[in-house]
Amino acid sequence: MPALSRRAFIATSSAAAGAALAGLGAACSGDDDEQPAGAGPSRGTAGGDGAPFDPADWASVRDQFPLTRDVAHFAAFVLAAHPRPVAAALERHRAGLDEDTHGYLPIETEAEPAVRQAAAEYLGARPEEVALTDSTTMGLGLLYGGIRLRPGQEVLTTEHDFYSTHQALALRERRDGVAVRRVRLYDDPAAATAGGIVDRLLAGVTPATRVVAVTWVHSVTGVKLPIADVAEALAGANAGRAPEDRALLCVDGVHGLGVEDVSVGDLGCDVLVAGTHKWLFGPRGTGIVWARPEAWEAVDAVIPAFEPSSFDEWLEGRPPAPTDGVRFTPGGYHSFEHRWALAEAFRFHLDIGRDRVAARTHEQATRLKEGLAGIDGISLVTPPGEDMSSGIVCFDVDGESPHDVVARLAAAGFSTSVTPYREQHVRAGPSIVTTPDEVDALLDELRR
């Protein structure tokens, strides 16, 4: 029986995988393409004009993206384009799978740990704490479907969260009868304060609250929650509670990851869920779930993992061991080339500098908010300060529907979006693929 185990298969297939990797270099161009999966930084990759990538030069960073220059891309956070290091890694893995699928597939045992390692470095975490998923929605569904709740325990969420959080909890409520309550954190988003948000959220916490489900940056208003302050307040509420009764702070972080210069230790939450194909500009169809070890202990995996110890349990008839990031990662066959290329997205940001990405994004977002505030007939929805907002900027134009405004801006060469909620606003997201000059041009178009 052991000869059939996944571990044994991996051992006997490693030589074939190495040969597949060695044979790929000649078919690819660029220094980065010569490296095996997960090896080395993305620095040195050529841009669109053939010049080496200089992560200290914002023009060089922009050149890593094949986005058309005929459009100013203020909606890149909806679904991102791949920068060249990510695209090169994706194509390298795709070529390997196309050339010799069975021989190349064992590279998974190197590529997935490389993704976890890069993610952990970016997050300030440990690799085994990171699970790999296909999206924020998948991560939230697996988390809220798998977190253990005793009879009488409840979930507290907010009115401002997106469909994926609300519906994942609604499905759990329908299946198991779990009580889910919502609180409103602010009435006027532009005037939201950290203290007011913390007070309203903590007022909703009861001794029965086991999960506090919130979103780091609200994509309907652009409000950024003070997650560290919430975590500190929850720690006070948890004082004296048994571990199985602690209120766990679970965060949809998709519109903060890739923007904010903080680690998971800075945030202080128990779980962070995010797609990595938005502000991080990772491969489409990728995401992560991070949790501290104590939080993983409270979560059951929903989909069997394709990793050696789980296969050994099956072969030997043993029950599943406690969950961690590796064992929470859904098994099965995925779009492997996309998942394995995710390491390059984290490295791309690390090469540029998490602090510099945050500063560049906030600089443009502040410039946009200040400009919008000075235009008659435009109402800024997002708080003006960096402490209460991130990269998303929401606003209204008097007498115009958001859809009409977005359509007119598109005709003028500006890609923006409408908030996909009942509450609709125009939404723009400056990022590393936009420039301060494009922010000024967008403001000029709105003035016209």
Image: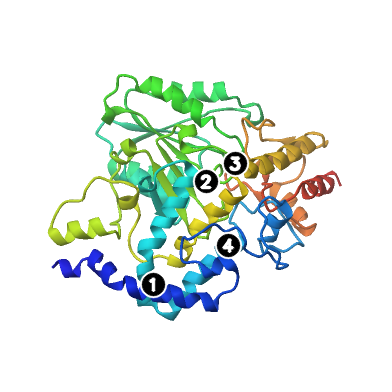
Task: Say the numbered circle drawn on residue 220.
Answer: 3
Q: Quick one: label 4, few (<14), some, or many (20+) residues within 10 Å?
A: many
Number of numbered discs: 4
Label 3 and label 1: CA atoms lie apart by 47 Å
Amino acid carrying label 4: it is Pro
Quadrant assignment, res 105: bottom left
Tell me whether the residue at label 3 lies in contact with that at label 1, contact meaning CB atoms closer than 8 angstroms: no
Task: Say the numbered circle drawn on residue 254.
Answer: 2
| Residue that appears at 41% across and 54% down | 133
Amino acid carrying label 1: it is Gly
Label 3 and label 4: CA atoms lie apart by 32 Å
Q: Earlier in the sequence, mark 2 or mark 4?
A: 4
Say whether residue 119 is left or right of residue 304: right
Q: Earlier in the sequence, mark 3 or mark 1?
A: 1
Quadrant assignment, res 277: bottom right
Label 4 element class: helix
Amino acid carrying label 3: it is Val
Task: Say the numbered circle drawn on residue 85.
Answer: 4
Label 1 and label 4: CA atoms lie apart by 21 Å
Where residue 231 appears, x then y in whole percent? 45, 28
Label 2 and label 4: CA atoms lie apart by 21 Å
| Residue that appears at 78% across and 34% down | 373
